[in-house]
Image (cartoon, helix red, strand yellow):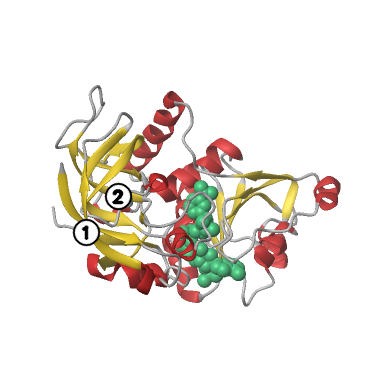
Amino acid sequence: MFSGRAWRLVKFGDPREAVELQEMTWEEPAAGQLLIRVRTAGAGLPDAMMAAGHFPLLGQPPFGLGEEAAGEVVAVPPGSRFAVGDQVTGITGFLEGWGGYADYTYLREGSTIRIPAGMTDEEAGGFPIGFRTAYAALVERAPLQAGQTLLVLGAAGSSGATATQLGKALGAKVIAVAGSQEKLEFAARHGADEVVNYRTDDLAARIADLTGGQGVDLIFDPVGGETAATALKGIARGGRIALAGLASGAPVALDSMDMLLRNYTAVGVLATPLAPDAEAAAWDHLAGLAEKGAIAVPLGRVHAFDEVPRMIAEQTTPGAGKSVVRVAAR
Ligand SMILES: NC(=O)c1ccc[n+]([C@@H]2O[C@H](COP(=O)([O-])OP(=O)(O)OC[C@H]3O[C@@H](n4cnc5c(N)ncnc54)[C@H](OP(=O)(O)O)[C@@H]3O)[C@@H](O)[C@H]2O)c1
């Protein structure tokens, strides 16, 4: 048995009041889990949605927060492909109440990899959710072909910045959409070929300009709302929109008659595990791209462990890049 601290949501509400540091114990992991001592944990808008009670897949508090974490394996079930002492990163058991903002956490074994060579702890803690979501969209659900044009909304955010990188690694031309000069520069530094400010530019007109009137082949949409509706005016015939989230507060309202007349498709994207072999192949592919430097975590702010409640509150208006929490030193 392992003992330590964990930030847990005790009621829905403002995270600065509703997230408490509690003493916890962790038993030996069950089949399909690993127990790690956490060094870093990745943050994102879903943390704030969970605290507010707006995350669809969770029940009532109390539960731990933090969807992804990196650290050292301290216990494995019999027959595991991991061993005590392995350095790993993966998706936590957050759906069962075990988050990454804690001294220890359980990872889903099938959604865990050994930390690729050259990856820092901060990058490792922020790797799994963004890249697995981007992979679900750009490889599994709306496969992107080399040479196609990908439009990424929320392109300086956690999901968008990883989709930009994966899109480039798959050989696409990437148009990044964000709402400030700082965020556009961030997107360009992290691989975007073109950038558009949806607040100051005419997004539909810019898409037409940048694609010679053809439109974009794929839209990665973690934003929804009006911005996604405007982006859809610039989708190519036969194009696809991958619906990954609703950072604007609402999913895009789809017009089925418009879809019929302009021949485009909308697909939902939820990064849930595939059958074990296919899931392992997805993670191997991502780890391989990271190892050869084709993708890297677009790091934003690194927070101290005692800042977690405030950090979660700030996830509704984060700066550019992936926020990560440093839980413990190596
Ligand atoms: N499907 C899945 O498996 C999956 C996995 C992870 C996350 N998600 C979802 O994806 C969404 C985004 O999460 P995230 O962690 O990437 O959030 P994030 O880091 O906060 O990024 C979201 C971005 O959206 C932009 N944005 C906010 N409101 C906007 C608006 N009205 N119009 C245009 N852009 C707007 C913001 O940038 P600007 O300042 O540039 O506007 C922000 O950078 C959430 O709904 C989350 O639940 C889904």
Regarding residue 267, the answer to whether it shows in the image is yes
Picture residue at 25% right of the left edge, 64% below the top: 21
* Location of residue 302 with respect to 61 vertically, above or below: below
Judged left or right of residue 270, residue 130 is left
- Of the residues shown, which amino acid type is indicated by label 2? Ala
Q: Is mark 2 within 8 Å of ligand 1?
A: no
Where does residue 256 sit, x and y in percent of width and height?
81, 49
Q: Residue at x 24, y 28 (%)?
A: 77
For the image, the number of numbered tags is 2
Q: Residue at x 55, y 46 (%)?
A: 172
Q: Secondary structure at mark 1?
A: loop
319 on left or right of 330: right
What amino acid is found at the position of numbered circle 1 in the picture? Val
Comparing 262 with 47, the one in front is: 47
Judge the density around disc 1: few (<14), some (14-19), many (≥20) Cα neighbours within 10 Å.
many
Query: Percent x, y for residue 234?
Result: 72, 58
Q: Say the numbered circle drawn on residue 327.
A: 1
Contact (Cβ within 8 Å) of mark 2 with mark 1 = yes
First along the sequence among labels 2 and 1: 2
Q: Which mark is residue 298?
A: none
Above or below, 317 relative to 209: below
Q: Position of residue 1 (x, y in %)?
A: 15, 41
* Residue of label 2: 69
Closer-to-camera residue (30/137): 30
From mark 2 to mark 1, how far is it between C-alphas? 10 Å
In the rendered image of this protein, does residue 292 appear above or below residue 161?
above
Query: What is the secondary structure assignment of the residue under circle 2?
Result: strand
